[in-house]
Amino acid sequence: MARKEMTEKDSNFVDHVVSVRRVTKVTKGGKRFSFSAFVVTGDQKGQVGIALGKSKEATAAITKATSRARKNMITVPVRGTTIPYEVRGKHGAAKVVLVPASKGTGKIAGGAIRAIIDAAGIEDALTKSLGSANGLNVAKATLNALAKLRSADSLAKLRGMTVKEMVKGA
């Protein structure tokens, strides 16, 4: 289950520790244990990032993952409290469908998808995870889907029009 943590120095970021696992490297001399942490971070205003961190201690792994996630953030266009339009993402065998929802619907999502849309600041969305249930691949598929989204302003700029001209033509 996702756990929320706030840091004092960057209080504008929300961090979700999606998973912390003990991993083992088997060597000739025995087993070496370390921790792998998967963290989602965002500012709840359209910026979100994910990362893995590995260390001999769980807290150090979480810290590493958090700093890496903040370095690799993407911007998500938000329309009110939801996403602008339906989008699909894929990573490996994991497929994700994100659908905009009317105000008041809430986040219909679970696991890594919920952590990502919460960190991005999306309040209302319907989601469906298909294929692989691997948390890391589902998270990467969700980030892939969110990266595909474009705002009306950016689409109008690409077409050399204003938003009003673009809507009037439809």
Image (cartoon, rainbow, N blue to C red):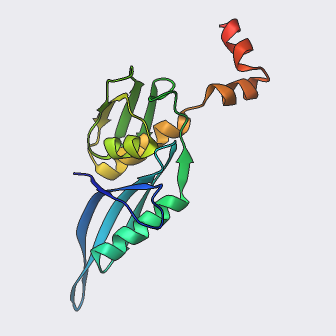
Residue at the extreme right: 160
Q: Is residue 119 visible?
A: yes
64 sits left or right of 129 in the view: right
Instruction: Indicate the position of residue 157 as horizontal and vertical percent values.
Output: 75, 28
Of residues 33 and 82, the one nearer the viewer is: 82
At horizontal 38% and vertical 22% (from top left) the residue drawn is 103
Q: Is residue 96 above or below residue 24?
A: above
Q: Quadrant of the C terminus?
A: top right
Q: Is residue 155 above or below residue 16?
A: above
Instruction: Indicate the position of residue 133 as horizontal and vertical percent values.
Output: 26, 44
Of residues 131 and 58, the one nearer the viewer is: 58
Q: Is residue 89 above or below residue 9?
A: above
Residue at the extreme bottom: 29
Q: Is residue 20 above or below residue 156?
A: below
156 sits left or right of 61 in the view: right
How many numbered marks appear? 0
33 sits left or right of 77 in the view: left
Q: Is residue 91 visible?
A: no
Instruction: Indicate the position of residue 35 as horizontal and vertical percent values.
Output: 28, 73
At horizontal 34% and vertical 60% (from top left) the residue drawn is 38
Instruction: Indicate the position of residue 108 as horizontal and vertical percent values.
Output: 29, 31
Where residue 60 sits, quadrant-wise, is bottom left
At horizontal 30% and vertical 80% (from top left) the residue drawn is 56
27 sits left or right of 52 in the view: left
Where residue 165 sits, quadrant-wise, is top right
At horizontal 42% and vertical 64% (from top left) the residue drawn is 66
